[in-house]
Amino acid sequence: MNLNELKNEINFGLGNLESIYQSILEFSRQEIEERVKVSALTYECLRYYNAIEHLIIRLLKYLKIEIPSGPFSHRDTLKALLSITKEKDVDNDTIKVIENLMAFRHIATKIYGFLINWSKLKFIIRDIETSHNQIKRFFTNVLDAIQAGDK
């Protein structure tokens, strides 16, 4: 993958992230049965995390960093991202938000999904709403740092 392809992949991924974010906003404002709302928003929040992880994997592939696999692959993927951001001197505050989303992903996709209710899900949605622009900026900043290093 060359730098132009990486830019295209990141832009596509950011567009996908934005689309999912808009779906989360739309579902969270609708007055529908709580059980249906929780199911829909749980799915959208999972998609949001998956879109973030897709962006991370694109960066790792471009930088020729091995993509983690195995039982701890999500955590190890995030650790690999952290090593990139330290090397490229990019602000890491966003990593904490991504870690929280990863923990939510774990709960939602394992047998613990029954623990998710509207009052708990609101915290995840609030994190996404307050951090969405920061997350997009984070990936743009990492891409900018990669470009600066490739020149």
Image: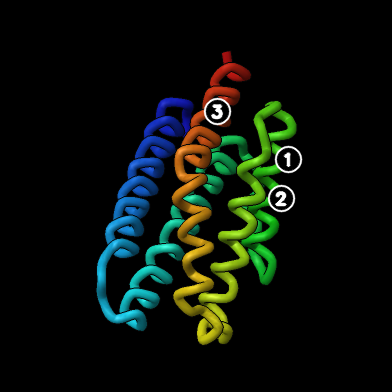
Residue 42 image position (x, y, % from top left) = 42, 71
Q: Residue 141 has which mark?
A: 3
Amino acid marked by disc 1: Ser
Rendered residue at 48%/53% (across/down): 128
Q: Looking at the rendering, in which quadrant would you find the C terminus?
A: top right
Q: Nearer the viewer, mark 1 or mark 3?
A: 3
Residue 67 image position (x, y, % from top left) = 62, 52
Q: Nearer the viewer, mark 3 or mark 2?
A: 3
- Rounded to the nearest angstrom, the CA distance separating label 2 from label 1 is 6 Å
Q: Residue 79 has which mark?
A: 2
On screen, residue 98 versus residue 31, left or right, reads right
- Rounded to the nearest angstrom, the CA distance separating label 3 from label 2 is 18 Å
On screen, residue 149 versus residue 53, left or right, reads right
Name the one closer to the observer, 51 or 34. 34
Residue 73 image position (x, y, % from top left) = 65, 62
Crowd class of label 1 (few under 14; some 14 to 19; many from 20; radius 10 Å): few
Question: Which residue is under mark 1?
Answer: 83
Mark 2 and 1 residues: CB-CB less than 8 Å, in contact?
yes
Indicate the quadrant where residue 106 lies. Answer: bottom right
- Rounded to the nearest angstrom, the CA distance separating label 1 from label 3 is 15 Å
Crowd class of label 3 (few under 14; some 14 to 19; many from 20; radius 10 Å): some
Rendered residue at 52%/82% (across/down): 113
Residue with the most extreme top position: 151
